[in-house]
Amino acid sequence: MRWPVPATAWSGGTPISDPRRHAARPAVRLLLAVAATACASAPPSGVQSPGLELVGLLELPAEVILDGVPLGGLSALAWDDHEGLYHALADDPGEHGPPRLYRLRLSFDDPDPAVEVLSWVPLRDVDGKPYGAGMADPEGLAYLPDGSLLVASEGLPAESVAPFLRRFTADGRQLSEIELPQRYLPGLDGGRGVRASLGFESLAVTPDGRRVYLATEGPLAQDGPAADLGVAGLARLLLLSWPEALALREYAYEVEPLRLTPRPPEGFRIGGLVELLALGPGRLLALERQFAVGAGFSLRLYAVGLSGATDISQFDSLAAVQPLETVCKELVLDFGDLGLELGNLEGLSRGPILADGRQTIVVVEDDNFTAGPAARFLLLAPPRHVPAAASSWLALAQRCW
């Protein structure tokens, strides 16, 4: 998701098309403060909400430059079981550097909390040529059991750049493209397909690697109004089999009406579904974000269940679906309860298992290349009274799971 703020032109290093960018960039270790130790703007580790506990916080320093390219715009995060690291995706269509992937190690442990940037690579096409500016707006990232990565782009409808779902090697080379229903492709008149900044934003794979979930941030143009003050929107959630890459079913996800009033009242505002994390077949965590000029951010995490929801895969427009049963949603966390100054949280990933056995998740912030810290990584866990096991997440939802 890109905000309407002045952009800083990318001017460092060699040109994007230079083949010297094919190799991974060198490792750089950045020592960062966990909230419990030296990050004065954050509350102490262990702050609890009704649903989750904040157990760690890492904050990148401002204006980190690697090989002439700023570290920032981190819109998605995926845990790599084989390498024991995180892959991160920069939400950069070519304004500050090439569309790119990072390899990171995150340590939330005292006394040496750190983010280690191991390398970054540009996204490249099937012929090995780096993606140029305006070829993609990468937003979603998922790790597959064979070590490859799925990348989703929400597209750039105003420039007639279609959204996509593509598979890449871990070093950034495109392997294949997954065919998507035609209804997602933007029309020339703006009357169908993904809307600007409301295309594919969420991407998740089940732990067994057999199911892929891909969702738009907001409604397709033909599916009704985008979320606004007093108005809910209907995003689409697509379920695919893997490795067959076959579209199995499709669901409607109701995006909450905006709770924030911009200042001035006619100012920019937006709300949508920005990330999914699959805990198992039909059981997901969903991150919704709202933003309004002059009012800031509102973020909520929901438990989502697909059982009983209407399969809308045969309908190009939701106006024709009657009756329509949307996916089940249940509030797990309002991030405002954590006592943090909220930013543009966009990515979700599985995190480390704590010493007491609780499975964590990591939430990453996309700074949109604006002034201030490049990103924060929040470490969240189920409260201590919930049984300490990976399945403890399932105990957080009473209705949907």
Image (tube, rainbow, N blue to C red):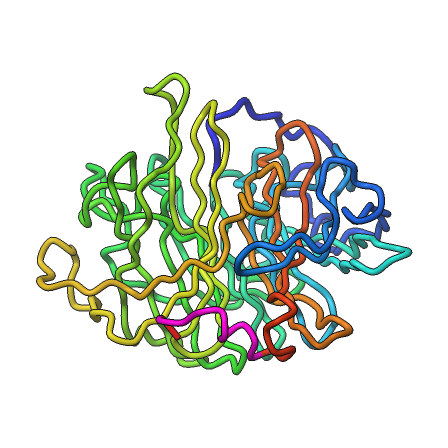
122 falls in the magenta region: no
394 falls in the magenta region: yes
Relative image position of residue 246 (x, y in whole percent): 34, 76
Give the position of the C terminus as an image quadrant: bottom left
Relative image position of residue 272 (x, y in whole percent): 38, 46
Q: Quadrant of residue 97?
A: top right
Relative image position of residue 26 (x, y in whole percent): 83, 52
**Which residue is the extreme one toward the front?**
385
Q: Which residues are magenta?
A: 391-399
**Which residue is the extreme one toward the right?**
111
**Which residue is the extreme one toward the top?**
264
On the picture, is 140 further left or further right than 187?
right
Which residue does the image show at 71% across and 77% down from the upper left? Answer: 357
Relative image position of residue 76 (x, y in whole percent): 57, 54
Looking at the image, residue 340 lies above or below residue 265? below
Front residue of this view, candidates 162 and 35: 35
Looking at the image, residue 262 lies above or below residue 158? above
